[in-house]
Image (spheres, grey):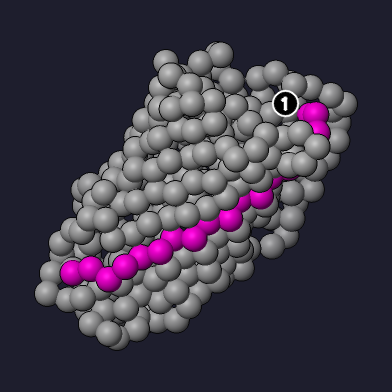
Amino acid sequence: MRTNGLWLLLALIFFSSYASAALPLTVEDLVTDKGKIKLDISLSYANSDNQGISTGEPVLIQTGLTSFISLPTLIEENRGNTDSMVATAGLRYGLSDRAEIYVRTSYLSEASRTTTPSSTNSNSEHHFVDAWTGINYQFKSDDHTPALLGFSEIALRERHTSSSSSFRSMLFGVTTYRAIDPMVFSLTAAYRLNREREDGRQNFKPGNLLLINPSAAFAANDRVTLTTGMQWTSRAADVRDRSRQGVRRTSSDLILGVGYGVSKETILNLTFKSNVSGSNGADLRLNCLHTF
C-alpha cells in the first residue's frame, strides 16, 4: 500500500511540473481513421506466487484495456511460483470516421515451479489462448459535453483445460472522455458475458466479469504521455457441471503508464498494474500501435 501510494504521489508531482502541451497520445488510439489499418501488438508479463491451499480459482492476466485471459489452477496443498507471458497481435481497420472493426489473437508461454509435501515439480506450456473480433463506434465527439464511444466483441475461439469453444463469450462496453489540454480524463466500463460451453466431458461456464476503469492522461510534450488511474473488477465464480468453483471476487488495482510517440505512425505504451486490494499480484504490458 505504501509503495503504491508513493508511486501515485510521484506521478502527480511530475504531472504538476508542466504547464501546457499537446493532447495526450491516448486520444489518437481510440478510433482508427477511415481506410487506415493499425497493427496492434502487445506483450504482457505476470508473476503469481501462492502458498497453502489453492482454491482452484483462475488467475486473470490483462492483455488490453478491457481484454483478459483466464488461467485455471488446481485445488491442492502446495507452494508455487508462476511466470506467464502473453503475446497478443491484432489488426484494426477504420470503416468510417466514427467506426472501426478489429480482430486479435493471443498466445501463452508459462513456466511454473511447485512444491508439495511429497515432491518438487517444474512445468512449462506454450499454446494458443483465444481469438476475438469486434467493433468500436464513436457516438459523439468531445465538444460541450464529453465524448462517448461504445464497443462490443465476440470470441471466435477460446481454449479451455481440455477442449475449445467458439462464440460463447461476448463483451460490451463504453468509454467516455473529456479533453482539457494538456489532460484527458476518461472512464471505461465493460461487461464480459460468458455462456455455458463444454470443456472435455464437463459443462463449463466461466464467471462473468464487470470492469470499471477511471483514468487521467497527461501530455508531457508532443511525444510523451503519462497516465494514472485505478481499475475495479468483479468476477463471478466459474461453474463446472452445475458446481460453483469458489466465490465472486472483487479487486482494485493501481495503474501507471507512459506512452511514447516514436513517429507519426508508431506509438509505444508501457503499462504497470499493481493490485491494491483483492488477489495479490502485478503485471506489466508493453504495447506497440503502428498505422499503415
SS majority, magenta: strand
Task: Give coordinates of residue 173: x percent, y percent.
Answer: 52, 53
Image point 29% across, 86% down: which residue? 243
Picture quarter with the N terminus: bottom right
Q: Give the range drawn in magenta.
A: 180-198
> Is residue 43 shown left or right of residue 142?
left
Quadrant for residue 193, please give it.
bottom left
- How many numbered circles does the render carry? 1
Task: Give coordinates of residue 202: x percent, y percent.
Answer: 17, 76
The answer to whether residue 103 of the structure is visible from this angle is yes
Picture quarter with the C terminus: top left
- 205 vs 187: above or below: below
Residue nearer the viewer, 281 or 132: 132
- 171 vs 257: above or below: below
Image point 49% across, 60% down: which residue? 191
Considering the numbered disc 1 on the image, is that residue within a helix, a strand or a loop?
loop
- 225 vs 156: above or below: above
The answer to whether residue 59 of the structure is visible from this angle is no
Task: Give coordinates of residue 114: x percent, y percent.
Answer: 29, 67
What residue sits right under mark 1 in the picture? 23
